[in-house]
Image (spheres, helix red, strand yellow):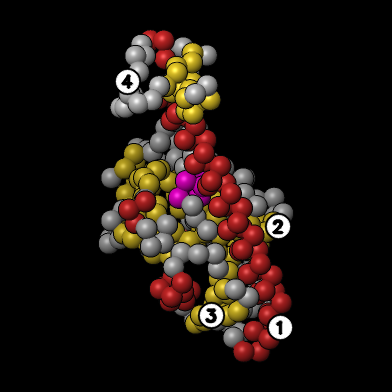
Amino acid sequence: MRRVVLKEPHAPYTLAIEEEVLTREPFILERDGEPVAAVIPISEYQAFRAWQEARDREEQRRKDLEAFEREQQAFERLKPELLRTHRGQWVAIYQGKVVEAGQDRSQVLDNFYGRFGYVPVYIQQVEEQPRVYKLPHRKVIR
Amino acid sequence: MWTYDQSVDPPAPFVDIRVSPPLYPALGQSLQAKLDTAADISCVPSYLVDQLGLLPARAIPAEGYDSVQTVVNTYTITLEVAAARFRNLEVVSIPEKYALLGRDVLNFFYVQLNGPDLTFDMSISP
C-alpha cells in the first residue's frame, strides 16, 4: 500500500498519483505521521457504497418487519373485541391501536397513508376465519 | 397483441408491467409478468420487494398445488399493466425474476389466448 505524506501549509494539496498505479493498490494519506484518509479506485468506492447501502436497507427492513409483527400481534390481541365492533371491516392497526376502519381496503389504506405516510402498519379484515388464498405457484416466500 | 415467451417450456403469455410502492410512483420498476389464472392473488419477485422497500401489509393463509397451507406476508403496490392502473393492490412475494398476474387482476381484462399462434390479446375493453 502506498503512503503519501501531506504537509502543511501547502493547501490545496496536490497529489501526483498515476491512475494505473491507483488501480493496483490504495494510497493512504498521512499528516504528521498519522493516516487521515485513503484514496481508492472509484470502482472499489462504488462497491463499498453499494455494500453500505445494502446494509442500511437490510437494517431498515429488519426494523420495519419488527414493527409490522408488533402491529400483527396487537391485531390478534384486539381481535375478540374487533369481532364485536368491526366485524367484516378492514382495520389499520398502528402503534397497537385501530386508527382507520372501513368496508373498502383501498380507502382504509389511502386514509392511513394520508395521515401517517408510508410506515409499517397491519391492515386486516376482521373475520372469524381468515380466507385461504390459492397460489398454485410452487414457490411462495413465507 | 403480444407473443408468448418461448424461452419457457411450454411457452407462456407474459406482459410488461410496472410496479411501484404506494405514494412513490417515481420509484416504479418495469418487469415482465406471467398470466396465471390459477392464482387467487398476484405475486411480485422478492428482489423487487427489497429494491422498492415494500412494507408488509398483513399475513394471509396461502395454499399451494400440494394443498399445504402456509402463512405468507402480503405487500401493497401500484400496478400498471395494459393501459390500466391498480392502486393499493395486495400481492405476495415469490423467488422469481418475473411477476404473476392472478385473477384479482386478470378479471378486469378481456384476455384472448391463441395457443397455436403463440399470441394473445389483453385489454380493458372488448
Q: Does A139 sit left or right of A11 as displayed?
A: right
Give the mark, 1 or 4, whose residue is nearer the N terminus.
4
Residue B76 within the segment the image draws in magenta? no
Callout 2, which amino acid? Gln
User: What is the crowding at mark 3: few (fewer than 14 residues within 10 Å), some, or many (at least 20)?
Assistant: some
Q: CA distance from mark 4 to mark 2?
A: 66 Å
| Residue at 49% in and 55% down | B54
Magenta region's main secondary structure? helix
- Spatial CA distance of label 1 from label 4 is 72 Å
Residue of label 1: A80
Q: Are marks 2 and 1 on the same chain?
A: no
Please say if the residues under marks 2 and 3 sit with CB atoms less than 8 Å apart: no
Q: Amino acid at mark 3?
A: Val
Q: Nearer the viewer, residue A88 or A46?
A: A46
Instruction: Determine whether, in the image, residue A78 is placed left or right of residue A104.
Output: right
Residue that carries the numbered disc 3 in the rendered image: A99
Label 3 lies in what chain? A
Image quadrant containing the N terminus of chain B: top left
Q: Which residues are magenta?
A: B45-52
Disc 2 is placed on an element classified as strand
Image location (x, y in percent) of residue A15:
35, 18
Q: Out of B4 and A40, give the one closest to the viewer.
A: A40
Q: Are marks 2 and 1 in contact (CB under 8 Å)?
A: no
The residue depicted at 31 percent of the width and 27 percent of the height is A11
Relative horizontal placement of residue A63, taking residue A5 as reference (left or right)? right
Per the image, the residue denoted by label 4 is A14
Q: Chain of mark 2?
A: B
Label number found at residue B69: 2
Query: Around disc 2, counting alpha carbons within 10 Å, would you say few (fewer than 14), some (14 to 19), or many (20 or more)?
Result: some
